[in-house]
Every structure is written in C-alpha cells, then in structure tokens.
Image (spheres, rainbow, N blue to C red):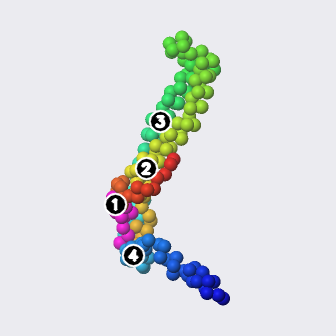
Amino acid sequence: MCDQEIEGFEADNPSDKFRMIPSLPPYDMDDQLLPREPRSAWCCWAWTLMVVAMNFAVFLMNLLLMFTIFTIVLLPTIVVVYLGFQCHSRVLHSAAHYCKTVLDDNSSSALIVLGFIIMSPLIVVAVAIYCSLARCLRLFMCFQPYSRAVYKGVKWQWCEEGGLCGYAKEQNTQVKAWV
C-alpha cells in the first residue's frame, strides 16, 4: 500500500469517531442493574396493592381530564346534533316553540349533518389539547412500575424527573413537537 492509502485508512480508525461524542452520560451507581433485595411476601403484597391503587387513581385522573376536555371541546357538536334530532319529525318531534317556528325537517336534517361534519376537526382539537396538557403536567410519569413493589430501594419515577407533575430540572428547549 502506498502512503496515501495508509493515511486514508488511519483516518477511519474507530478511536477518531469516539472523539465526535461530546461527552459520555454520567455514570450513576443507582441506575445500575445490580441485584436488589426482594421484599418479603406480605410486604410485596402490600406494596403491590399500593402501586396498583396509585396507578388506578392516575388512570382515573387521566380519564376524568380527557372526559372534561372532550366534553368542553365537543359541546357545539353535541348541541347542534341534539337540536337536530329533537326537532326532526321522524325522531323526537318536540313540541318546543323553536321546533315549531324556526326548525322544520329540512333544517333539522341540516343541523344533524352539520354536527357530524364538525365533529372530526373538533375531535382532533380535543386530542391535541389533551396531549399537550398531559405532557405539560407530566401525567404519564405518575404511573409506577411493578418493580417498585417487588424490590426494596426502587425510586419513585417522578423523583428523578423534577417532581410529581412538575417540570424536569433541565428542560431541553430545543426539542419541539407538533401535534
């Protein structure tokens, strides 16, 4: 081999590529997968019930938040479709004053169709609001793994992430997500 080929070959040395990494992540002894001390049977059952109850409470909190957001955002669709079905002669045919004077069967049908047409974009808006609020409040970090109940010394997930439903200690402002 000539000298130029050897120099080109040496440039592809793997040790040169390692210099491109800005810094290695910090080495933490707590994050190692060392054998942990298991809990006793009764203690494991008690912690399991606590972790399951906490995860269920977090699930209900997420479900309540989602229900509230979807109800508020989809309220125009709910009202328009309800009025359309209430005043149509083949569905409910209400005796309300506005059904007799303002809405006939054609306008009731138009309200029903309009309500179902505006439902799709409003569902997208509701999902985007819920996802951004859940991300901001860090609701999914409140779920705890089962290993919390089995082994002693497992940290709560939110302790390392900046607190329960709070912001992390070091937020990366460069990362943005579009929903």
Identify the residue under disc 2: 134
Magenta stretch containing residue 155, yes or no?
yes
Mark earlier in primary sequence (2, 4):
4
Helix, strand or loop at label 3? It is: helix
Identify the residue under disc 1: 169
Seen at 36% across and 60% down, the residue is 170
Does residue 106 lie above or below 163 as drawn?
Answer: above
Helix, strand or loop at label 1? It is: loop
Identify the residue under disc 3: 73
Magenta extent: 152-163
Q: Is residue 48 visible?
A: yes
Between the C-alphas of marks 1 and 2, the distance is 18 Å
Give the residue type at disc 4: Tyr
Identify the residue under disc 4: 27
Does residue 167 lie above or below 44 as drawn?
Answer: above
Seen at 34% across and 63% down, the residue is 159
Mark earlier in primary sequence (3, 1):
3
Q: Point out the frontmost of discs 3 and 4.
A: 4
